Image (spheres, grey):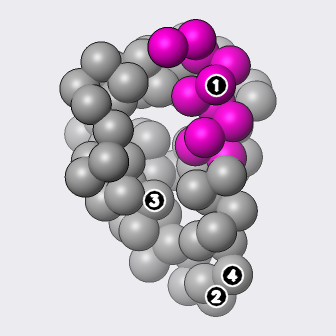
Amino acid sequence: MKIERLIRMANDIGNFFNSESDKEIAAEGIKNHILRSWDPRMRKAIITYCQEDGSELSDLVKTAVTKLAA
């Protein structure tokens, strides 16, 4: 899958969780959704993108992907 598609998908998930007032809870929700729904290759690709560039990810998604990488 192309990284552009993964970025769009991650930001869409982030937009859904952005309504949560507690951004830590929102980031955990994004992380958990990606863990449950994305295959390992997709997770690895978005983590690598976030670590190397990440400029097209929302701040909330960056936080979630950083948690995912830990």
Instruction: Give the residue displayed 67% in from the left and 46% down from the top.
Output: 11
Q: Could you classify mark 1 by the number of other residues whose Cα lies within 10 Å: few (under 14), some (14-19), or many (20 or more)?
A: few
Dot 3 or dot 4: first in sequence order is: 4
Image x and y of residue 60, in percent: 62, 56
Indicate the amino acid at tag 3.
Answer: Ile
State the residue in front, 6 or 26.
6
Instruction: Describe residue 67's horizontal placement relative to residue 8 as left or right.
Output: left
Q: Could you classify mark 3 by the number of other residues whose Cα lies within 10 Å: few (under 14), some (14-19), or many (20 or more)?
A: many
Secondary structure at numbered mark 2: loop
Secondary structure at numbered mark 1: helix
Q: Which residue is mark 4?
A: 19
The tag on residue 30 is: 3
Instruction: Give the residue displayed 49% in from the left and 14% down from the top.
Output: 1
Q: Which residue is mark 2?
A: 21
Indicate the amino acid at tag 4.
Answer: Ser
* Callout in the foreground (3, 1): 1
